[in-house]
Structures are given as C-alpha cells and as structure tokens.
Image: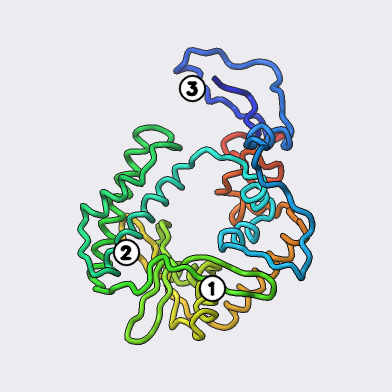
Amino acid sequence: TSARDYGGARPRKVSRFVLEALDRPAPEGAAFKASAVETIHRHAPPTEGQQTLAGVIPEEQPIILSFRQVDDYDTCPLKYKYTHLLRVPLLRDHRVVYGTAIHEAVREYNRRKARGQPVTSADLLATFERAWVNEGFISREHEDQRMEEGRQVLRRFLDFQESLGLRPTFVEAPFSFQLGMTRVKGRWDRVDLRGGESVVIDFKTSDVRRQADADRRARESLQLAVYALAYREVYGQLPARMELHFLGPQQVLVGVAEPEEDLLTDAQEVIRNVSRGIRAQNFIATPEYYRACRYCAFNSICPYTATGDPLIPEPGE
C-alpha cells in the first residue's frame, strides 16, 4: 500500500525509477493533504492509559526531570511534547538501531572490565548482534553495510581500550540532584578514578575526524556538563575532567574538556529554563535545521520543521 500524503510539509514525489521498476504510471490529480493535527492524531496511540497534558505546574511544586527530558525540551519544546506527553509512536530509524547496538556492546565491555573480567572481540560482537534489530534500513544491503561498520567500530574500540589498560570505577551509576524545586535524575555512562582524579565519560557513535572538533564538542556537551554538575552535587567536588569518546570505524577520538564554572552555570540555567517552560506548559516549536530539525524523528509530521528534501524543488523555484 502507499499514499500520496504521509504527513510531511508537502506531498512526497515518487521517484521515476521506482515507477519504472514497478511498471506503474505516474500518479495524477491532487493529493489529499492532512493537517498537522490530523497527522498527529492519525499516528497517536490509543487514548486509554495515555498520559494527558497537565495544567500549569506552580513554582512551589517539585518536579522530576530526566536528562533526556531536559535535552529534548532544550532542543525543541514541541519535540518534548511529542515524545513525553503525546507519546507519538515512531517507526524505528536505522541510526537509532545502530547507536543502540553499539552502546549495548560498549556498556557490556565497561561492566566486565569494572568486575575485572577479560573481554574478547567475540564477546563484544555477540552483544552487538543480539541488540541489533533489522528495522528502519533502506535495504538488506544497507543493513549489512551498517552492521559491518558497527563490527569494525567495536574492534577499534576494543583495541583502543585495551591499549589504555584502564578499569572503570562506575558504569551506568545512577545520580540525582536538586536544583531549586527541580530534581534531575540520570546515569553516568562511565566514571574512572585515575591517580586519585575522577573522569566522567560519555560515548558517541559520531565519526569525528579532527581533535579540535572532538574537544569543542566535549566542551559544548550539555550531557557532560550535567554529569559534572551531578558529580559535584553527589560527591562534593568536581571531576578532574570530562571526556567524550567518539567511536568511528577508522579511529577512536577522545574529546577532553575541563568542568569550568561557566559550563556548569550554563547547564544550571538550561535546567532552570526547561523547568520554567514545562511548568508553564510552553511547547512552542523552535525549528532550526542543524540543531533541532535535521535528525528529529518527528520532522515528517511536524508542521514547523525546518527540513526539506533538497532533491525536490519548492513550488516557484
């Protein structure tokens, strides 16, 4: 089955190559265009048991936010609403499948090393393949390509970690801290104690090639800043540094940043702004191509998306 309208900003243009392969004529006539609200309701889950939008939350009433909620709202308040309030169901995306499987293998490595157990390449690849879901890929060839890339990434990761000879102190350790009437909860991916100094670590599957870019992204990472803030609130001191490990098929690149006070102050302000916005039920979209919309899971149904198919000209072009 197919449809002319899938809820995007404009009708999808069917490739002439697809039509030729299927021996189908080009579609004629105007397509029915669903409104954004109709599209959201079309894809929404059953109303029974669904979390409903709450009213305005008073400043004196405590709220609990996960890091993901903070990050989603900071990226785009409407994304937060779609994800955490409306709970709009989504089809799996191949990038999510890939990233989840890699992180499961990395988590297993860190857990075993924290227990002093050896880890082999076969162990990592077995965990990776168990976590793999064959959904969201363009074709079988595309899936095979991504899976092989993941295997290569994990071999690089294992060689890199074994060459360092470091043992994690905490893996997936939970944290919770209070900022005003907002409690922030989350988990540190990994914390190392090295020579009496603590290092908070996060892992990304982005293929970053330049050290300057890795260091910049570590310094700009809201997640690392919240990790450092949580570490100070829980243990009474800042970590010595923050590391962002970029796991690419050609190399592992480590971005390093110090938890400077201005970074922590900025993170606190983000949390306060998010808390104020959620309390006020302000879910106005903040579309921005590179920061919010390009990889947003809702960009095909969101009426405010800043994305567009560059291969299909806009009317009047």
- Residue 18 tag number: 3
User: Is 209 placed above or below 179 here?
Assistant: above
Q: Few, some or many C-alpha atoms within 10 Å of disc 3 (few <14, some 14-19, many ≥20)?
A: few
User: How far from the left and from the top, in percent, is residue 216?
Assistant: 49, 71
Q: CA distance from mark 2 to mark 3?
A: 47 Å
Query: Could you say which disc has been placed on residue 225 in the image?
Result: 1
Mark 2 residue element: helix
Which residue has dot 2 on it? Answer: 111
Query: Please, what secondary structure does the residue beneath circle 3 have?
Result: helix
Front residue of this view, candidates 222 and 8? 222
Q: Nearer the viewer, residue 212 or 191?
A: 191
Q: Tell me the colour scheme of the image.
A: rainbow
Q: Is residue 122 left or right of residue 293?
A: left
- Which residue occupies 42% across, 45% down? 97
Give the class, few, some or many, for how many residues have Cα within 10 Å of label 1's Cα (few <14, many ≥20): many
How many numbered discs, if any? 3
Of tags 3 and 1, the one toward the viewer is: 1
Q: Residue at x 66, y 32 (%)?
A: 42
Q: Quadrant of the C terminus?
A: top right
Q: Are marks 2 and 3 in contact (CB under 8 Å)?
A: no
The amino acid type found where label 2 is placed reads Arg
Q: CA distance from mark 3 to mark 1?
A: 47 Å
Mark whose residue sits in front, 2 or 3: 2
| Disc nearer the start of the sequence (3/1) | 3
Residue 281 vs residue 241: left or right?
A: right
